[in-house]
Image (cartoon, grey):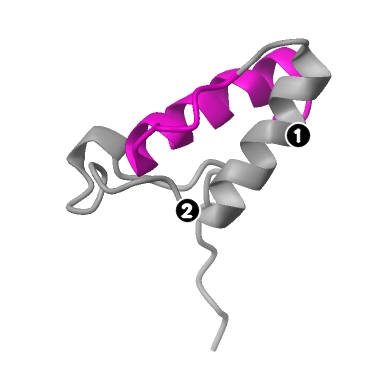
Amino acid sequence: MATPRTTPRSTESPEKDPRDWTTGDEPMTGPQRSYLTTLAREAGEEVSDDLSKAEASERIDELRARTGRGA
């Protein structure tokens, strides 16, 4: 019996909007802070130290696109 073919999955995973995270209003994590600092330095920008997890995630996405790391 032949194996049925399936449609390949999209390369984009269905992610929940950071604003909908139950912990999104908590302070950003250590790894988020570290990565955000690196991206901000590469982009020649400064980043606030008091971002929430959700805000940090959104800022990381913005800076990844700007620095080319999101490709």
Magenta-colored stretch includes residue 56: yes
- Residue 12 position in % (x across, y down): 53, 41
On screen, residue 34 versus residue 27, left or right, reads right
In the image, residue 39 above or below residue 8: above
Mark 2 vs mark 1, CA separation in Å: 14 Å
Q: Is residue 11 visible?
A: no
In the image, residue 46 above or below residue 38: above
Q: Are marks 2 and 1 in contact (CB under 8 Å)?
A: no
In the image, residue 67 above or below residue 6: above
Badge number at residue 29: 2
Q: Is residue 16 visible?
A: yes
N-term mark: 2 or 1: 2
Q: Nearer the viewer, residue 9 or 58?
A: 58
Residue under label 1: 38
Mark 2 falls on what kind of element? loop
Residue interval drawn in magenta: 47-71
